Image: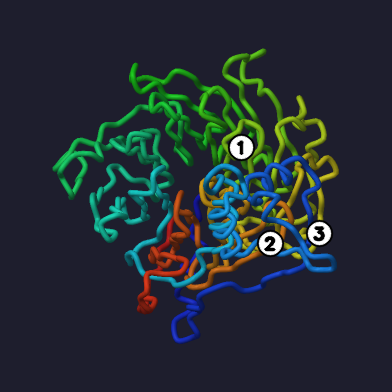
């Protein structure tokens, strides 16, 4: 289940009259990795982010260090790579060293909880959705000017997810409702009030109770959605109808995504603790997945694909991120045993100390990353961008109001960004530049950069978000 109930209180009130953390930069750096991925993906990651071997010569007895920018530039001028310039790995090696940890700079400040926030594929737009019905689209190239302010229609509880079409002409948004709404982002109207200034067309997912997750396909022709009725839905936008429903899990489907550009493979994660892989080309039996991946001890809150149809990561309510290789998936779940000997609900309780060291006896993941907190809401995690970092890092929001960045290959926690005073549910790394934006239940949307914009970080005022109860 992805939404909080009446016992949840707004954490920002805990900071009134106390010390509000607004520290910039990294903390908890670790020069010694706490785990290491002994797997093919570690080699693939290194290939994407290690410079030409002619530049990566080490002196005997010297500690292995990244190649300096000066040496990289000298190597480019001397054509060491024999390519006449930087390779993509050279570029990633340069840029990935400069993490977006300076700041933060305030992009926006709202009076309701931020639930979703993402850059467009080209980084020119940024979308943020709030519990108070607002969905804002910012023009990044024009100083974060609000290009469109959408007031969501028929909202139940909150905006649970948004997705921008590949051509950036349309946006879909969801809530705890069976209707997914689609808005024309390319229109000249700035204030988009549902069916007043613009039409918000409703796409009927009538079999669903509520939608937690929605994604456009790469070609923009389909939507995939995960629902609170334990199902996955595929909607054909051209035919304007549902084309597929899969009874996918035994509990809420909190997250779905296409595995790669083909659109044939779908990943899903659920409160039944399982990640599943679905191949639309070869449904052997109705509602039967291509494979199942076990390892989480609690529900899965989010999945992000590496984009290669092989690797993905998942965030879990067992307070871990897990890295998966689909080649390790099984065909059944007979080993998915019940592990709890305690009562716990992530919506209002801390994670039990006795559960922190438990391990699934049939864990199929290839790496586990710990340090952040997944409580109260469906907190999201992602691979860092391929263009600028070679997907060298994993980053995630956290209930403790921070953003955590991990090294994929070593598992080391390389940065912790501190500013917010309430859970960070979503965050997004710019696809090309060292800029990361975090959004929180405190209503703040802030930018972290390297080396920064040359300005001092924007002071953010303390504010009180009214306590609200829901039944």
SS label for mark 3: loop
SS label for mark 1: loop
Q: Is residue 437 left or right of residue 415?
A: left
Residue 452 coordinates in the image, percent (x, y):
42, 69
Task: Return the mark for residue 357.
Answer: 3
Asked if residue 332 is positioned above or below residue 360 in the image, the reply reads above
Give me the residue at 57% from left, 63% from top.
69
Residue 36 coordinates in the image, percent (x, y):
79, 54
Pick whichever, 429 or 241, lies toward us: 429
Residue 328 coordinates in the image, percent (x, y):
77, 32
Question: Residue at label 2?
Answer: 351
Task: Return the mark for residue 251.
Answer: 1
Q: Report whether residue 381 is seen.
A: no
Question: Marks 2 and 1: CB-CB under 8 Å?
Answer: no
Give me the residue at 51% from left, 35% from top.
226
Asked if residue 329 is positioned above or below residue 367 in the image, the reply reads above
Q: How is the image coloured?
A: rainbow
Q: Report whether residue 409 is seen.
A: yes
Pick whichever, 197 or 454, lies toward us: 454
Q: For label 2, count other residues whose C-alpha is less than 10 Å away and answer few (under 14), some (14-19) or many (20+).
A: some
Which label's residue is closer to the chain start, 2 or 1? 1
Distance, label 2 to label 1, CA atoms, is 20 Å
Task: Return the mark for residue 129.
Answer: none
Which label's residue is closer to the chain start, 2 or 3? 2
The extreme front residue here reads 78
Distance, label 3 to label 1, CA atoms, is 25 Å
Q: Is residue 99 left or right of residue 51?
A: left
Distance, label 2 to label 3, CA atoms, is 11 Å
Report the mark closest to the observer, 2 or 3.
3
Give me the residue at 47% from left, 54% from top.
428
SS label for mark 2: loop
């Amino acid at each position: 289940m992805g939404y909080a109930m009446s016992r949840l209180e707004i954490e920002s009130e805990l900071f009134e009259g106390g010390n509000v953390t607004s520290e910039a930069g990294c903390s908890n750096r670790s020069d010694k990795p706490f785990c290491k991925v002994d797997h093919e993906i570690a080699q693939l990651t290194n290939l994407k982010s290690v410079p030409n071997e002619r530049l990566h010569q080490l002196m005997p007895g010297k500690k292995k260090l990244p190649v300096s920018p000066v040496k990289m530039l000298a190597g480019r001028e001397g054509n060491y790579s024999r390519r006449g310039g930087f390779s993509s790995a050279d570029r990633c090696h340069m840029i990935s060293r400069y993490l977006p940890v300076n700041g933060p700079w305030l992009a926006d400040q709202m009076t309701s909880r931020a639930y979703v926030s993402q850059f467009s594929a080209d980084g020119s737009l940024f979308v943020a959705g709030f519990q108070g019905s607002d969905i804002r689209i910012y023009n990044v190239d024009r100083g974060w000017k609000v290009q469109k302010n959408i007031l969501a229609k028929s909202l139940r509880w909150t905006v649970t997810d948004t997705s921008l079409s590949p051509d950036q002409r349309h946006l879909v948004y969801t809530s705890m409702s069976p209707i997914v709404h689609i808005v024309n982002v390319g229109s000249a109207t700035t204030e988009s009030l549902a069916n007043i200034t613009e039409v918000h067309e409703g796409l009927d997912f009538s079999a669903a109770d509520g939608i937690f997750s929605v994604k456009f396909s790469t070609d923009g022709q389909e939507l995939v959605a995960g629902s609170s009725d334990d199902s996955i839905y595929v909607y054909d936008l051209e035919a304007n109808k549902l084309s597929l429903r899969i009874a996918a899990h035994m509990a809420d489907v909190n997250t779905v995504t296409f595995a790669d550009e083909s659109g044939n493979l779908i990943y899903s994660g659920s409160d039944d603790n399982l990640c599943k892989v679905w191949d639309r080309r070869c449904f052997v039996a109705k509602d039967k997945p291509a494979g199942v991946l076990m390892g989480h001890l609690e529900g899965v809150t989010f999945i992000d694909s590496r984009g290669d149809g092989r690797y993905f990561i998942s965030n879990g309510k067992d307070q871990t991120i897990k890295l998966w290789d689909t080649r390790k998936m099984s065909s059944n779940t007979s080993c998915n045993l019940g592990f709890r000997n305690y009562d716990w609900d992530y919506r209002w309780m801390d994670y039990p100390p006795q559960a922190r060291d438990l391990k699934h006896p049939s864990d199929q993941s290839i790496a586990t990353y710990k340090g952040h907190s997944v409580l109260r809401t469906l907190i999201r995690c992602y691979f860092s961008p391929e263009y600028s970092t070679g997907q060298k890092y994993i980053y995630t929001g956290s209930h403790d109001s921070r953003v955590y960045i991990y090294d994929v290959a070593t598992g080391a926690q390389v940065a912790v960004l501190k500013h917010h005073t309430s859970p960070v549910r979503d965050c997004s790394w710019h696809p090309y530049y060292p800029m990361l934006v975090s959004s929180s239940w405190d209503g703040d949307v802030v930018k972290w950069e390297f080396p920064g914009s040359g300005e001092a970080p924007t002071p953010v005022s303390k504010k009180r978000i009214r306590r609200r109860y829901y039944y």
